[in-house]
Amino acid sequence: MGNSIEARNIKLVVAYDGTAYHGWQRQAPGLPTVQGSIEAVLGRLLGQAVAVNGAGRTDAGVHACGQVANVHTADRRIPIANLLRAANARLPDDIALVSAAEVPPAFHASRSAAGKTYRYRIYLGPGKPVMRARYVYRYPRPLDTARMADAAGRLVGRHDFRGLASSGDQRDNTIRTITRCELAEGADEVHVTVAGDGFLYKMVRNIVGSLVEIGRGRWPPESIDRLLSTGDRALSGPSAPPEGLCLMSVRYPPEALRMPVAPARARRPPSSRGGIGESER
């Protein structure tokens, strides 16, 4: 259906609080997921079963401000703006479609992606951050953020990140390019922002877990170099909890989003009925 002239391909930007869901990807019946919730709503609105493709399979408890998805539909009766409003009125309060736009038939939220940006929030303040508990990793001890920043910078570049992938990742190619890995400090939080062309299973959470181990003084920043060179998972820290992680945005090359130009319609010849011809004017 994706290649049909009658079909349209709709790109969605999705925000969600992942606390109540078993991740993005649909699971066995009865397990709530973000993908499953969106498919159910769009299916009812469009009167057909739909498959919503996500740019990334965020884990249970992980959030998103800028997840991207796409869905093919043969229904062109509903304007996209109306579909967006109707879907948001029916989705749970913890899921929202931020925007919707028609994209070329070949666009795929995952396969067309050129990169993603994630942000991880660590809470270092006193007491329990009750109003932020769903969105931060509460770490009860001081962290040396200068050491963490030094280590984070060593991750930038093209490396084999198999030592920072969890055992559930079965991909043969573990080489990725990290374009940004940096820390920002606030009054009582530290944010770790990581951007790259792709990520392995739990890679960002494993990066944060390793940075925390360095920040608390267990390892020197140079331990990242050894981790990258050996690919030994035992040299990395534990996975940081899911609640601190948020998928901020997904990047696409402009050509992946550019709609094809419709061919110009041929001009009709001048009518000769009851009038003067073009040459007589």
Image: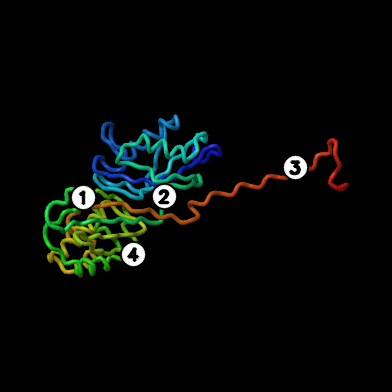
For the point 29% across and 47% down, the residue is 58
Q: Amino acid at mark 4?
A: Arg
Looking at the rendered structure, the secondary structure element under dot 2 is: loop
Inter-mark Cα distance, 3 to 1 = 65 Å
126 or 233: nearer the viewer: 126
Please tell me which of labels 2 and 1 falls first in the chain.
Answer: 2
Frontmost of labels 4 and 3 is 3
Q: Which mark is residue 158?
A: 4
Q: Which mark is residue 132?
A: 1
Q: Mark 1 is on which residue type? A: Arg
Q: Which residue is mark 3?
A: 268
Q: Nearer the viewer, mark 3 or mark 1?
A: 1
Residue type marked 3? Arg
Would residue 12 appear left or right of 121 to someone viewing this image? right
* Label 1 neighbour load within 10 Å: few <14, some 14-19, many 20+: few
Horizontal side of 124 relative to 46 (left or right) equals left
As measured in the structure, the alpha-carbon distance from the residue carrying label 2 to the one carrying label 1 is 33 Å
Q: For mark 2, does the 10 Å Cα neighbourhood hold few (<14), some (14 to 19), or many (20 or more) residues?
A: few
Mark 3 neighbour class, 10 Å CA radius: few under 14, some 14 to 19, many 20 or more? few
Could you say which disc has been placed on residue 237 in the image? none
State how far apart marks 4 and 1 are (Cα): 34 Å
Mark 4 → mark 2, Cα distance in angstroms: 20 Å
Residue that label 2 marks:
111
Q: Real-space Cα distance between discs 2 and 3? A: 42 Å
Q: Closer to the camera: disc 4 or disc 1?
A: 1
Q: Earlier in the sequence, mark 3 or mark 1?
A: 1
Pick whichever of labels 4 and 2 is earlier in the sequence.
2
Q: Residue at 22% of width from left, 60% of height from top? A: 190
